[in-house]
Image (cartoon, rainbow, N blue to C red):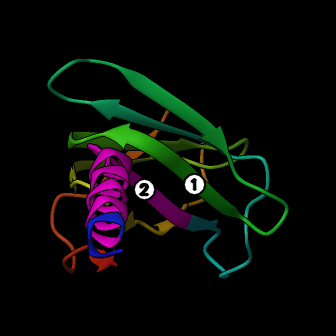
Amino acid sequence: MRGLCVVFLVSLAASVALAQTDRGTITGTVSDPAGAVVANATVEAKNTESGAVYQAATSSTGNFTLAQLPVGTYELDVAASGFKRYVRPGIIVEVAGTVRVDAALQVGSATESITIEAEAPLLKTE
């Protein structure tokens, strides 16, 4: 009986180890200057090391999630009709981590952009 218990525990530990991932998530909410959510905004995360681009669109509640991103540093680009582009470089995605980036868009032409260079530290939820 004891041998069966040991085999079970080893199998369980192996399955947990295999379930670990080298991926993370960027999530957030896109809003306008009045604080109202912006639906159907285009959200792109570009891995600055590999150049790979991952895309999503905001939901009707202004939320977006870019899941299963490889670990690395990303630049987030948010675009919506009638608003300036929002660009946020230096977002670090860690193993199994979730980084929250809320984007406050400003009214203007899509050809204009706002690049965030200094802001409060990103919130890491675990």
Helix, strand or loop for the magenta stretch, by majority: helix
Please state the horizontal and vertical placement of residue 98, each as a whole percent of the image. 37, 65
What element does badge 1 sit on? strand
**Residue 65 - label:** 1
Q: Are marks 1 and 2 in contact (CB under 8 Å)?
A: yes
Is 43 left, or right, of 93 in this rendering? right
Q: What crowding class fits label 1: few (fewer than 14 Cα within 10 Å), some (14-19), or many (20 or more)?
A: many
Please state the horizontal and vertical placement of residue 88, each as a whole percent of the image. 31, 51
If you read the primary sequence from the N terminus, does the residue marked by circle 1 or circle 2 appear first?
2
Q: Is residue 17 above or below residue 100?
A: above
What element does badge 2 sit on? strand
Gap in angstroms between the C-alphas marked 1 and 2? 6 Å
- Residue found at the very far front of the displayed protein: 1
Is 72 left, or right, of 28 in this rendering? left
Q: Is residue 100 above or below residue 80?
A: below
Quadrant for the C terminus, please. bottom left
Q: Amino acid at mark 1?
A: Thr
Please state the horizontal and vertical placement of residue 5, each as a whole percent of the image. 34, 72
Q: Is residue 33 above or below residue 101?
A: below
Q: Amino acid at mark 2?
A: Ile
Residue at the (36%, 65%) spot, across then down: 4
Could one spot residue 110 in this view of the protein? no
**Residue under numbered circle 2:** 26
Q: What crowding class fits label 2: few (fewer than 14 Cα within 10 Å), some (14-19), or many (20 or more)?
A: many
Q: Is residue 28 above or below residue 93?
A: below
Could one spot residue 17 in this view of the protein? yes
Q: Which residues are magenta?
A: 5-28
